[in-house]
Image: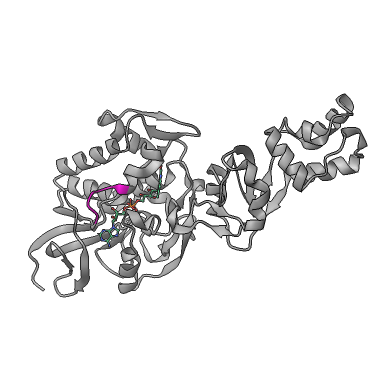
Amino acid sequence: MTASQQVDVLIIGAGAAGLMCAISAGQRGRKVLVVDHANKVGKKILMSGGGRCNFTNMYAEPDNFLCENPHFFKSALARYTQWDFIELVGKHQVPYHEKKLGQLFCDNKASDIVDMLLSECDQAGAQVRTHCSIESVAYDTGKTCYLVKTTLGDIAAESLVVATGGLSIPTMGATGLGYELAEQFGLRLLPRTAGLVPFTLSKEQLAPFASLVGSSADVRISCGEQSFRENILFTHRGLSGPAVLQISSYWQPGKDISIDWSPDRNLMDFFQQAREERPKAELKTVLANLHTKNWANVFCEHWLNSQPMNSYSDKQLQALADQLHGWTILPAGTEGYRTAEVTLGGVNTDDLSSKTLEAKNQPGLYFVGEVVDVTGWLGGFNFQWAWASGHAAGSFA
Ligand code: FDA
């Protein structure tokens, strides 16, 4: 194959990680081309954060990330931190605010972030082409370069960066190309599943919650050792809301999740006090103070037997308190990639350099962003990994 175009660095995928990689490589004087099969760049950035892009988190630290090797991502995250990205946002005068828990969102539109990245690409001399599909990728060992057949012509590149993202929201252009390329070049893959995704419940499990659909409650949710304090939302299909999205990344089919409906208040104390102060009041009236009247009615009708408070013994009150502090449910499944924000698993980090994101056994081949087995919590952490890994590879590719 003779290439119609020759570049130093070819990046497949003009999303968050690919564009950041292009900026860093371009700033080093490398001739960079980013190609994407979509009709526009950064589609996931545009739809993220409800259209306002939660672009990073002020409190990002290693504990906020999941990876088979819990040390792998530390180096890249330390070399391009949330403060580096915040500085870039400031340089471009993109207005933003903290919504909660250190989550930074654009004041206006997510397109401010895409415009900023494209302007940086332009200044760094990196070219970006959309509507470009990849037909094949080969490595020429003699010339030590990659030969990539695309619908826009053949491209030869010294370094090839795979920034094709994960599998979530296929309608937005997600494909498995990154995983296929990893396998083609002998890198191992870890099983992929939908993360940051709502739970589905069976018909029988859903029935009691019918009148609660659309309402939310502040809870502590746990799965195994991991727990999150956030809101849970009842939906037509099951359970959602930030608490559920967070814990879904730690859940496996067949595992129970546990919900503490009163994360701040010791319910035994609360019930004993209510029994003393309002002996004739029914449990459902007392419980209405915890969340809503409707919530209390549903729980009393289906799981707790509502009686006047003075009819309960201490033992019975303790049992009720235990039930509500550690209410367990077995999700039927998740909504899958159709609505998931991220893909867990992916390219095995054992086969990548944590410093450069280059494949250990394939010179000049890099993997960045979500295609790699690094997943962040909800709250801007996934973009921070995209920026940091893109920057790390762009500093060496
Ligand atoms: P990304 O998916 O951004 O980019 C991959 C690119 O590769 C795409 O442009 C795609 O078209 C291209 N591509 C794929 N296959 C290709 C092929 N075969 N040929 C050519 N090009 C190809 N995170 C966060 O931190 N804060 C937030 O607010 C949100 N919100 C959010 C909302 C929703 C609805 C979703 C689905 C996701 C989020 N996320 C998020 C997660 C975040 O969007 C995600 O982790 C990053 O976009 C990952 O960046 P990448 O660059 O790795 O992939």
Q: Is residue 158 left or right of residue 207?
A: left
197 versus 296 height, above or below: below
Q: Is residue 371 above or below residue 84?
A: below
Image label count: 0
**Closest to the observer, 42 or 225:** 42
Q: Is residue 40 magenta?
A: yes
Magenta stretch containing residue 168, yes or no? Answer: no
**Magenta segment range?**
38-43
Q: Is residue 395 visible?
A: no
Q: Quadrant of the N terminus?
A: bottom left
Q: Nearer the viewer, residue 82 or 282?
A: 282
Q: Please state, as top left, top right, bottom left or bottom right, where the C terminus lies in the image.
A: bottom left
- Left or right of residue 57, residue 355 in this image: left
Single out the residue that lies furthest toward the top.
Answer: 277
Q: Is residue 102 left or right of residue 35?
A: right
* Dominant secondary structure of the residues highlighted in magenta in the image: loop
* Residue 350 vs residue 258, the one in the foreground: 258
Position in image of residue 25 (x %, y %): 21, 50
In the figure, residue 154 lies in which quadrant?
bottom left
| Picture quadrant where residue 291 is located | top right
Q: Residue at x 88, y 43 (%)?
A: 316
Residue at the (63%, 63%) spot, across then down:
254
Which color scheme does this rendered protein use? Answer: one colour
Q: Is residue 201 visible?
A: yes
**Residue at point 58%, 57% (across, down):** 251
Measuring from the top left, give residue 327's x and y in whole percent. 72, 48
- Residue 262 sits above or below residue 68 on the image: above
Please identify the quarter of the rendering in which residue 288 is found.
Answer: top right
- Find residue 275 and report its horizontal and vertical position in percent: 87, 30
Q: Is residue 167 above or below residue 21?
A: below
Q: How far across and how far down the image is residue 139, in percent?
A: 21, 72
* x 49%, y 51%: residue: 196
